[in-house]
Image (cartoon, coloured by chain):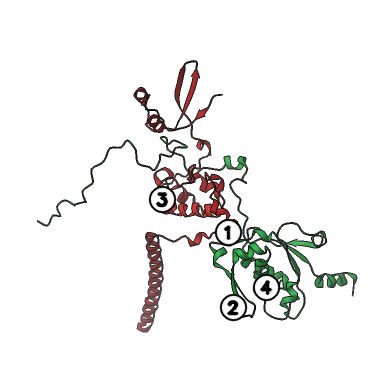
Chain colours: A red, B green
């Protein structure tokens, strides 16, 4: 039976020091490339070939191109909840660990929000099948009962808070200015009537 | 009185039976929904002294959900009027002892205080799972809409749905799936010299 194993070229090289010198020759492409390494045993010879494979997400991608270069979540305007596991799952690797920002392409706030959402989904027991080994403590005591989380309780970061305060101030300033203008307009009209 | 008006009169004062599915619902929020039906508040003939409440059958009370850390933050106080007999039971301990008690207490506290409360509580039927005795199931004519949607776990999602889910981003070309190496320092990277702290040019004080 042909066994198809997908491992990194680097880890393969570091684990097999014997063929390290021979594998130097075909390092034409990027060092860590999305490849499948296939091993074939034909008699005494072992044939190893690296094949470039297509990404499994290729046909399913959503168009998130934005003129201002917004991140995919901001561009779509999605309000992601911790129960939307099919969306959260895309940002997790095989160990249920969040990918870094250079891979996900999210902005800083959305990445931070996704960190909390992944933690919420894990604690609610929704993505237990992604975990390599189910945590035994999660089955004891209060953890065996259903729990849900509120996304509004995600603490806002400092810059987010500052921006929100800025927005509130601008709103209040705009209202006050409109009120002042209306008052001055009224006074001006009164003055004109008196002159007449 | 015509026969139609007579039947209308009977239907107005008859007690109807409602079903409420407690799966993944907050008992303390849904208690106020149940209260509306138990005390007959939704009826045009409602009056606090008018005995016009309905029956509510609550199923799946075993699978209630509490928000955040409420399972070990909420405590139920009880005192037997003996010295030193006061006790605080956590919500998860109470739920472990009796699956229906949290829902019962939540509805009891939501109902208005008074002589009618015990009477209204007798019309609440709570079952830990979906098994209802047939004499009760035959009476049910209405189902109350639950407050929050039931979340699905990842293992319960069928593969056809999961494989067709639209993807928000694509992995980079030099990404290796299934590797544990990303995010870790490169083992073959040489030691880098320590960066000197940033000094803007032309800002020297001397």
The residue carrying mark 3 is A107
Q: Residue furthest left?
A: B206
- Residue at 56% from the left image edge and 43% from the top image edge: B165
- Residue B138 is left or right of residue B130, and the answer is right
Which label sits in the foreground, 1 or 3?
1
Q: Chain of mark 4?
A: B
Q: Pointer 4: what residue?
A: B108
The answer to whether marks 4 and 1 mark residues whose Cβ atoms lie closer than 8 Å is no
Q: Badge 4, how many Cα within 10 Å: few under 14, some, many 20+?
A: some
Instruction: Give the answer, above or below, for where B3 lies relative to A98.
Output: below
Image marks 4 and 3: residues in contact by CB distance under 8 Å = no
Kindly report the distance in space between the C-alpha atoms of the residues bearing marks 1 and 3.
Answer: 38 Å
Residue B7, picture quadrant = bottom right
Label 4 or label 1, whichever lies nearer to me, is 1
Q: Chain of mark 1?
A: A
Q: Are marks 4 and 1 on the same chain?
A: no
Name the residue that disc number 2 marks. Answer: B84
Cα distance between the residues tagged 4 and 2: 26 Å
């Amino acid at each position: 039976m042909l066994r198809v194993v997908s491992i990194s070229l680097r880890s393969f090289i570091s684990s097999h020091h014997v063929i390290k010198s021979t594998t130097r020759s075909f390092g034409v492409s990027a060092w860590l490339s999305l490849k499948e390494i296939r091993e074939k045993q034909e008699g005494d010879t072992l044939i190893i070939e690296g094949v470039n494979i297509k990404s499994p997400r290729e046909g399913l991608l959503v168009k998130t191109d934005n003129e201002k270069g917004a991140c995919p979540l901001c561009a779509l305007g999605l309000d992601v909840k911790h129960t939307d596991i099919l969306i959260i799952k895309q940002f997790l690797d095989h160990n249920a660990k969040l990918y870094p920002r250079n891979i996900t392409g999210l902005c800083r706030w959305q990445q931070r929000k996704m960190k909390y959402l992944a933690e919420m989904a894990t604690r609610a027991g929704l993505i237990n099948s992604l975990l390599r080994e189910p945590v035994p403590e999660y089955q004891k005591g209060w953890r065996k009962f259903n729990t849900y989380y509120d996304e509004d309780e995600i603490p806002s970061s400092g810059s987010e808070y500052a921006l929100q305060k800025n927005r509130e101030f601008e709103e209040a300033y705009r209202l006050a200015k409109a009120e002042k203008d209306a008052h001055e307009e009224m006074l001006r009209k009164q003055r004109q009537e008196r002159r007449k | 009185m015509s026969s139609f008006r007579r039947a209308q009169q009977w239907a107005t004062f008859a007690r109807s039976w409602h079903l409420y599915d407690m799966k993944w619902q907050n008992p303390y929020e849904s208690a106020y929904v149940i209260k509306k039906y138990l005390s007959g508040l939704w009826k045009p003939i409602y009056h606090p002294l008018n005995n016009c409440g309905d029956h509510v059958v609550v199923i799946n009370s075993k699978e209630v959900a509490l928000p955040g850390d409420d399972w070990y933050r909420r405590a139920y106080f009880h005192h037997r009027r003996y010295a030193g007999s006061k006790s605080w039971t956590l919500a998860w301990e109470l739920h472990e002892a009796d699956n229906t008690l949290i829902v019962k207490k939540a509805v009891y506290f939501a109902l208005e205080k008074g002589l009618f409360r015990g009477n209204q509580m007798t019309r609440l039927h709570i079952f830990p799972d979906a098994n209802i005795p047939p004499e009760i199931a035959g009476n049910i004519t209405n189902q109350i809409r639950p407050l929050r949607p039931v979340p699905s776990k990842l293992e319960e999602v069928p593969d056809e749905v999961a494989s067709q889910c639209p993807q928000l981003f694509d992995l980079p070309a030099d990404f290796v799936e299934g590797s544990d190496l990303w995010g870790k320092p490169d083992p073959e990277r040489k030691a880098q010299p320590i960066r000197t702290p940033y000094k803007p040019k032309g800002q020297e004080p001397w």
